Image (tube, rainbow, N blue to C red):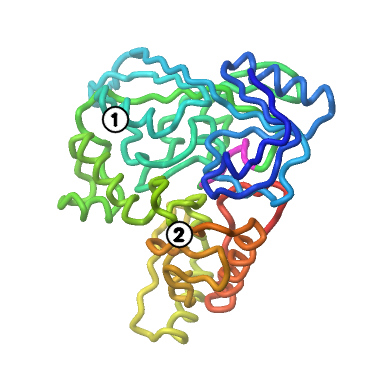
Amino acid sequence: MSTLSGAQLCDHTTLGLGGPAKEFVAARTTAALVDAVTTADRDGEPLLILGGGSNLVVADDGFAGTVVRVDTRTVSLVEAGQDPDTGETLVLVRAEAGVEWDSLVRRTVEEGLSGVEFLSGIPGRVGSTPIQNVGAYGQDVSQTVVEVGVHDRHTGERRTMTNAECGFTYRDSVFKGGDRYVVCEVVFELRRSELSRPIRYAEVARALGVEAGVRVPLDEARETVLALRAGKGMVLDPDDPDTRSAGSFFTNPVVSAEEFAAVRARVAARLGADVEVPGHPDGEGNVKLSAAWLIDRAGFTKGYGTGPARISGKHTLALTNPGGATTRDLLDLAREVRAGVEEAFGVRLVNEPVMIGVSL
C-alpha cells in the first residue's frame, strides 16, 4: 500500500477532470483496502473509493479527504455443477474489486464462459459493476452476480451479500448513493459454452445479421459489441478526444404509460405526428425511453457545445472533455442539456455518473 498527498484526481478519471486529493492511497490487496478504509473511518476522514475512475465527476476543488484506489487483481474460476435445464456446466468466477472489467470479460470469452460477453468494452473495474448494476446491449451484471463480498463500515466486519440482498434495479443497487459498503470482490455465475446468451438487443442482432434471440459464438459477440461501442466513442482511446468521457452521462428514463403518452404528444407537436418515439416495455408496465434520442431531438446534436466541454461527436449520450475543460464546464453543459430535454418533452434526465463534491 502506498500513500501520496495532493495527487491530482484528473489523472485518475476517464474525463480527465478533478482537483487534488488530500491523501491518495493505492491498495493492492483486500486486506490493505480494508485497512485504509478502517483508518480513514477511525480518523474521521472523508473517504472516496476509486476504481478506474470511469463513472466519476469530481469537483475542480478535488476531494478533502482520503481517496483509496482499489488495485487488487486476483481472479479464480471454480466449476459448480450443471444447469438442470440446459446441461451446461456452471462456473463461478470470483474477481477482486480492482480487476479491470474488460480484461475479465475478455478472459471469460477466451475460457468459453458465457454470460457477460455483451458487456465487453465497458471501462472501469469489477468493484464498480454491482454498484450501478452495469449493463449494456441487453445484459446487466445482476443477471450473473451470485454474491458480493463487502466490508461493512457500520459494523467493521466483512460480509457476503447475495444477489437478492444487493437490491438490483435498473442502473441501481443498495450500494449506489450510500457509503456503508465497500465492495471487495464479486462472484459471477457463468456457463461453459462457446455460444453467447440469446441476443436481446436489436442493434446487436442487426450488426450480426441474425434475429433477436439467437446465440452466436462468444468471440463474434464480443467483437461486435466492441465495434459498436468504438463507433460511439465508448471504448477508451487516448488518441480520440471523444472517449474522454464518463460513458453514458444520463440514464434512459423510465416513464409510466400515461407519461409516455404525454411524451408522444409533445413529440408530435414539436416534430410531427408521424415521428415515432422509441420506447421499450420494462416488464413492469412502464416504458424505457432513449435518452440519446431525446437529447438529439431536443436540438443537442453530436459535437454540440458552446464551451470547452462538448457532446461527443459520435454519440449524444456522452459528454466529453476534449481538452481544457473544467468540471464546472461539463456540468454547465449537462444542465443545459437536461433543461432543454425537459422543456421540449417534459422528461427530466438523471445523471448516471457519481458526483463527488458537485451536484447536477
Q: Which mark is residue 114?
A: 1
Helix, strand or loop status at disc 2:
strand
Task: Identify the magenta region.
Answer: 171-176
x%, y% of residue 155?
75, 20
Which of the 4 quarters of the picture holds residue 292? bottom left
Q: Residue at coordinates 32% horizontally, 41% vertically from top-left?
A: 118
Give the residue type that dot 2 points to. Answer: Lys
Q: Is residue 227 highlighted in magenta? A: no
Q: Percent position (x, y) of residue 225?
A: 29, 46
Q: Which mark is on residue 203?
A: none
Q: Is residue 120 above or below residue 103?
A: below
Vertical order, 222 against 254 (above or below)? above
Can the viewer see residue 289?
no
The image quadrant where one finds the C terminus is: bottom right
Q: Is residue 192 above or below residue 288?
A: above
Q: Position of residue 157 (x, y in %)?
A: 70, 16
Q: Nearer the viewer, residue 62 or 159?
A: 62
Q: Pick the residue in front: 246 or 296.
A: 246
Q: Are the residues at dot 2 and dot 1 in contact (C-beta closer than 8 Å)?
A: no
**160 is higher (above) or lower (below) than 359:** above
Is 175 contained in the magenta span? yes
The residue located at (74%, 18%) in the rendering is: 156
Q: Residues within 10 Å of mark 1 (few under 14, many from 20)?
A: many
- Residue bearing mark 2: 288
Determine if residue 326 is in view.
yes
First of labels 2, 1 by sequence position: 1
**Residue at the image point whose x is 39% and y is 24% from the top:** 189
